[in-house]
Image (cartoon, grey):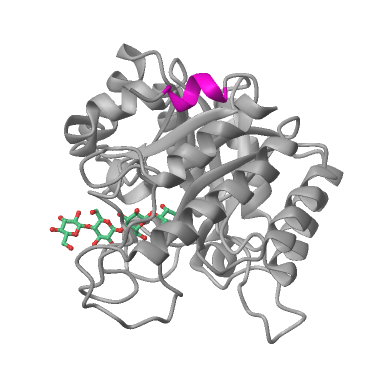
């Protein structure tokens, strides 16, 4: 049988997986054998935990936290501030209009204190702010993504979220997390945001590179350049949501019920070259978390093309190691 990935990479970085209450059951042996870190896929997001002002629903998040504890796995918290999957009440006043800035920030503080405090014995790092940067490649002045957070509270909601999280758990490592993180235009915006937070003395300890990649994009050069650029901030880096779609984003084909041999060979080669880079930069990278664990379950099934199955991981639908696993496994052994 194959060696556990977490052992092979023990001296380099943690190996993580996103899970949900279903996959901790259906993928239990795979998770506990190869992985030493977990992230809740949806269960710790605002709308999952706090659907109404006076109502917290912790059951599913608690199940994942208990699973991590029982199995001695690290747990990353995801996520405190996002434009998506956030309960509507948060931004509204009694008459259904937008709340005042002070009210929004007070609600945010209460949410962060409650959630961070509840899990502080098991969660060692939080994605405090997720995806706040604009993707707009055409407007060179674009910076933050339009959102209710920005409309109501202005740019400062980001710094405030980090301050509240730090107050709630001074031990926790606090991350800014985003996707398209290796595209040069977005990379520079992320760099600029984190640099300005550091200049203001905001407690931030890491940059999360989501790494939702595919067989063709981003280029290895862009990945390397992104790691080097973020490393200049002097913070720790983590890949937080790695997966490797076998399709270009815009590919519409829905006929495949299993991946082609070519796809699997390309995927193995690409995972190998990417992990070589990650291993090379292991002094800066403290964890590599996949957004799932094996090809039987991925959020990419049906996204962005309905009916299109995907095979983005190192383990197949039966949880057997793919060629990509073999290539990734050999890297620390050769070094
Ligand atoms: O909970 C409802 C369920 O009640 C309903 O029956 C079902 C029918 O569609 O939908 C369920 O909600 C879905 C939820 O996942 C839970 O499965 C939502 O429709 C679906 O949109 C949601 O997708 C999640 C997505 O975030 C939302 O933006 C994915 O599972 C999750 O993997 C994905 O994760 C994000 C990260 O948080 C941030 N970075 C990008 C990443 C991938 O999009």
Q: Specify whether residue 203 is in view.
A: no
* The C terminus - image quarter: top right
Q: Where is residue 95 in the image (x, y as percent from the top left)?
A: 32, 68
Q: Is residue 237 above or below residue 299?
A: above
> Would residue 213 be found to the left or right of residue 13 on screen?
left
Left or right: where 62 falls relative to 26: right
Q: Is residue 17 above or below residue 219?
A: above
Q: Residue 68 location in percent, x, y?
A: 35, 21
Q: Position of residue 119 (x, y in %)?
A: 41, 23
Q: Looking at the image, which is closer to me, 124 or 185?
A: 185
Residue pictured at 50% horizontal, 65% vertical? 215
Residue 40 placement: quadrant:
top left
Q: Is residue 139 left or right of residue 245?
A: right
Q: Which of 172 and 111 is in front in this view?
A: 172
In the image: residue 103, left or right of residue 18: right
Magenta segment range? 3-9
On screen, residue 331 above or below 150? above
Q: In which quarter of the image is the N terminus?
A: top left
Question: Which residue is at a point 40% across and 37% down the rendered structure image?
Answer: 17
Task: Report whether residue 308 is seen.
Answer: yes
Q: In which quarter of the image is residue 122?
A: top left
**x and y percentages locating residue 164 in the rendered image:** 59, 35
Q: Is residue 7 magenta?
A: yes
Give the number of callouts. 0
Quadrant where ligand 1 appears? bottom left
Q: Does the magenta stretch include residue 285?
A: no
């Amino acid at each position: 049988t194959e060696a556990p990935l977490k052992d092979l990479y023990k001296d380099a970085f943690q190996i993580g997986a996103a899970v949900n209450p279903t996959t901790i059951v259906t993928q239990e042996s795979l998770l506990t054998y190869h992985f030493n870190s977990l992230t809740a896929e949806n269960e710790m997001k605002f709308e999952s935990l706090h659907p109404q002002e006076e109502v917290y629903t912790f059951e599913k998040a608690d199940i994942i936290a208990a699973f991590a504890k029982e199995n001695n796995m690290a747990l990353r918290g995801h996520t405190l501030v996002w434009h998506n999957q956030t309960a509507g009440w948060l931004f509204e006043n009694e008459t259904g209009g937008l709340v005042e800035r002070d009210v929004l920030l007070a609600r945010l503080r209460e949410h962060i204190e409650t959630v961070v405090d509840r899990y502080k014995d098991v969660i060692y790092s939080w994605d405090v702010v997720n995806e706040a940067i604009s993707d707009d490649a055409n407007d060179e002045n674009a910076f933050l993504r339009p959102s209710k957070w920005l409309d109501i509270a202005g740019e400062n909601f980001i710094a405030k979220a980090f301050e509240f999280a730090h107050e709630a758990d001074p031990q926790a490592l606090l991350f800014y997390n985003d996707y398209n993180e290796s595209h040069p235009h977005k990379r520079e915006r992320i760099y600029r945001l984190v640099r300005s937070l550091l200049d203001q003395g905001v407690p931030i300890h890491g940059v999360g590179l989501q790494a939702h990649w595919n067989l063709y994009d981003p280029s290895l050069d862009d990945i390397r350049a992104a790691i080097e650029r973020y490393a200049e901030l002097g913070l720790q880096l983590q890949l937080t949501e790695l997966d490797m779609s076998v399709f270009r984003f815009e590919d519409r084909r829905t006929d495949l019920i299993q991946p082609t041999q070519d796809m699997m060979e390309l995927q193995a080669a690409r995972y190998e070259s990417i992990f070589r880079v990650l291993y090379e930069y292991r002094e800066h990278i403290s964890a590599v978390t996949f957004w799932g664990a094996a090809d039987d379950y991925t959020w990419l099934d049906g996204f962005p093309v309905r009916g299109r199955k995907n095979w983005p991981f190192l383990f197949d639908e039966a949880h057997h190691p793919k060629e990509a696993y073999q290539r990734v496994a050999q890297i620390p052994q050769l070094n």
